[in-house]
Image: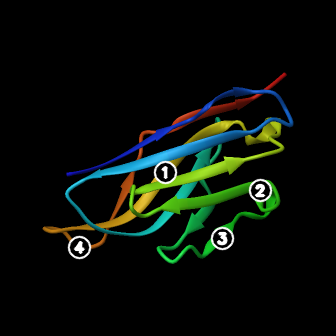
Amino acid sequence: QVNLVESGGGLVQPGGSLRLSCKASGNIFSIYSMYWYRQAPEKQRELVASITRYDFANYTEDVKARFTISRDNAKKMVYLQMNSLKPEDTAVYYCKADISTLSTSLTEYWGQGTQVTVSS
């Protein structure tokens, strides 16, 4: 059993910052790539950022200069530092991780999501 739990969402004014966190727990053998997705109302879920186990990061173009993804392998956590937030960043943000356990091969796991609202 593996769980991902996000935290850190909330309401912030345009231009503000938030830091999202996601913690993996359970019978984990290894965590490979970790991801942040978001889904705005009536829109498809989209990939925001990803990071490999060796800290190679990728971003979608419209967040590249504003967001930073990082991870702490010892704590089994991934973070998303979001700066210069815009109203169009408003969405539910989801954490995903590729994880193997002692009894399963590589499997995708998702968190339950955390709401980020950017509004004045």
Left-right relation of 73 to 20: left
The residue depicted at 60 percent of the width and 76 percent of the height is 56
Q: What is the three-letter code of the residue carrying label 3?
A: Asn
The residue depicted at 51 percent of the width and 77 percent of the height is 54
Tell me where residue 15 sits by quadrant.
Answer: top right
Report if residue 73 is visible in the image: yes
To which residue does mark 1 refer?
95
SS of the residue under disc 3? strand
Give me the C-alpha separation between circle 2 and circle 1.
Answer: 16 Å
Q: What is the three-letter code of the residue carrying label 1?
A: Cys
Give me the C-alpha separation between circle 2 and circle 4.
Answer: 32 Å
SS of the residue under disc 2? helix
Viewer-side residue, 49 vs 46:
49
SS of the residue under disc 4? loop
**Label 2 close to label 4 by CB (< 8 Å):** no
Crowd band around label 1 with a 10 angstrom C-alpha radius: few (<14), some (14–19), many (20+): many
To which residue does mark 4 refer?
105
Q: How is the model colour-coded?
A: rainbow
Report if residue 45 is visible in the image: no
Q: Earlier in the sequence, mark 3 or mark 1?
A: 3
Q: What is the three-letter code of the residue carrying label 2?
A: Val
Viewer-side residue, 68 vs 1:
68
